[in-house]
Image: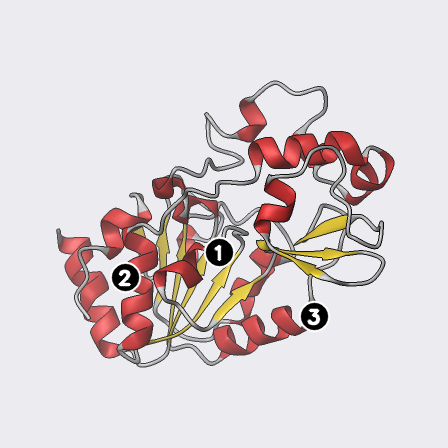
Amino acid sequence: MEKIEQLQQMLDQSRHVVFFGGAGVSTESGIPDFRSTDGLYHQKYPYPPETMLSHTFYRQHPEEFFTFYRDKMLYPNAKPNAAHKKLAELEQAGKLTAVVTQNIDGLHQAAGSKKVFELHGSVLRNYCESCRKFYPLEAILHSSGIPRCSCGGIIKPDVVLYEEGLDQNVMEGAVQAIAAADMLIIAGTSLVVYPAAGLIRYYRGNRLVLINQSSTSADSAAALVLHEAVGKVLSQLHV
């Protein structure tokens, strides 16, 4: 309880809070974490997930890519959890200035968050590689094999695959938000995926909070560390 009180106190003293989250934010919505013990990395597939979610694999084996992608990356019935809802509440109250996320599930927006920097894109956006026509999630979900546009082009999910660069505008927006923050809450991320994990170095304040089930490389630099579920922690805060 002491740590929650400490977190509340830090929140009360802050005016520009930024939340930086990873897969652990969505696990409470039933979306598995890649690196947890029961996550994708511990399941059996012909290739490792990093290979199947790479740009090269997408180009060379599109049919296998889409089979894996539909099976393991899409959770259309997932709903925002306590963490997503509390963050939206904090933004509405004028406390939280931005959410920076490594997740591609769109749950922050579904909960009501407006200022969200999606570092790795979103499964909700898909586009034809030939004519750039936009398609919703259903176009991938309810197709089989390689999803095709009416023009014949491949419909590609707007997610950042391994070997692909991050969107520069999104990255710059995230950097600016973090640099201007007086409190940075990092949650549900192991901080091992770069360049996203490198964003922490742009924070200049002294209220760095880490909420993660396991230890991270940044624990020693944090003002407060909580090894608990993100939703459980955030739901105890009042705006």
The percent coordinates of residue 34 (x first, y second) are 53, 36
Q: Where is mark 3, residue-wise?
A: 168
Q: Where is mark 2, residue-wise?
A: 86
Going from N to C along the chain, the mark reached first, 2 or 1, is 2
Going from N to C along the chain, the mark reached first, 2 or 3, is 2
**Circle on res. 106:** 1
In this view, the residue in front, 162 or 180, is 162
Q: Nearer the viewer, mark 2 or mark 1?
A: 1
Q: CA distance from mark 2 to mark 3?
A: 28 Å
Secondary structure state at the residue bearing disc 2: helix
In this view, the residue in front, 180 or 89, is 89
Position of 178 with respect to 111 (left or right) is right
Residue depicted at x 23% and y 78%: 13
Residue 11 visible in the picture? yes
In this view, the residue in front, 28 or 131, is 131
Question: Would you identify the image quadrant in which residue 4 lies?
Answer: bottom left
